[in-house]
Amino acid sequence: MLKHRNQGVNTKQNLKRSFNLITLLGIGFLALTLSSLVYQAQISREAPVHILHLENMAFEVKAELTLYQLSLQKIVIGEQTLQPERIDSYVQNAMQLIGIMLRGGEYRHQLMVKPEDPVLVEKLQTLQTQTHRLKTLGDQWMGLTTDVEKDQDILFDTLFEDVLVNIAEIQSNLSIDKKQQLEAHDLSVYQLYGGVLFCALVLLAIFYYSNRRYYQANQRLISSESKAKSLFNASVDVSVTFNEQLLVQSFNKTAEKTFGIARQK
């Protein structure tokens, strides 16, 4: 009986170990799945933010070049009060922003990476070339250089219109890319929510299956212990009954012998 009890205790411990192992493996798998989904959602969230920064930079480039063009026009009508260095700072700022958009760098405490879209890179390179040419014509307009081209004011205005068209195309491409990235981000979020729900259901199934197996095995163990206990009690009852019968028979034999001797006397 004691041996059977020890076997029962060992069986319960083995069941608990199996249950804990299955649970830990399930939790580990689900944690890995959720981590990958969260990482994917995080990456997809950063892409629209990066494009939004590029849109802001393109808008700032347009604003700086517009201020540059307006300042040069005021020189012609004699209303310009700014120093040439201040006017030149507008185009310098625009060129710096274009350089960050092309090669990457820090923008408003955000690290910008080099764009991978070949169409965007080509348009930015064209914009950079146009801005350099615009600065050259502007320097001639302000009298900062001795080399003056013929009709440089007309050339400047024509080039400035081309720059505005190029910036508009860049902004349009960025808007399309942002829309696609936002759709991809929404899809990643939906996948994340679906993954969380799926993992929760799988975890629930693991717990249910493990608990069910543990409960069934425990019930079988209890039934086995109950049967063993019943057999033990039955054997004890038989042993007691048999001993009682032997005791009665022994008592009867002793009494018969005693009373038999008494009668003979």
Image: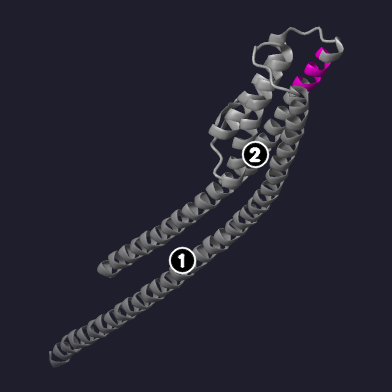
How far from the left and from the top, in percent, is residue 20? 41, 58
How far from the left and from the top, in percent, is residue 52? 68, 38
Q: CA distance from mark 1 to mark 2?
A: 45 Å
| Residue located beneath label 2 in the image | 49
Counting residues from the start of the chain, the first of labels 1 and 2 encountered is 2
Would residue 115 be visible to someone looking at this image? yes
Can you tell which mark lies on residue 128? none
Crowding at mark 2 (Cα within 10 Å: few <14, some 14-19, many 20+): some
Query: Horizontal placement of 70 versus 215: left or right?
Result: right
Which quadrant of the view contains residue 13? Answer: bottom left
Tell me which residue sits at (81%, 20%) in the image: 70
Residue 153 belongs to magenta span = no
Figure quadrant of the N terminus: bottom left
Front residue of 217/18: it is 18
Query: Horizontal placement of 187 versus 258: left or right?
Result: right
Above or below, 25 against 76 in this view is below
How far from the left and from the top, in percent, is residue 180? 67, 52
Q: Overall secondary structure of the magenta stretch?
A: helix
Tell me which residue sits at (73%, 36%) in the image: 162
Q: How many marks?
A: 2
Which residues fall within the magenta stretch? 68-75
Tell me which residue sits at (71%, 19%) in the image: 138
Name the secondary structure under disc 1. Answer: helix
User: Label 2 amino acid?
Assistant: Val
Tell me which residue sits at (58%, 29%) in the image: 100
Figure quadrant of the C terminus: bottom left
Front residue of 243/239: it is 239
Front residue of 38/100: it is 100
Crowding at mark 1 (Cα within 10 Å: few <14, some 14-19, many 20+): many
Above or below, 118 against 151 in this view is below
User: Label 1 amino acid?
Assistant: Ser
| Residue located beneath label 1 in the image | 210
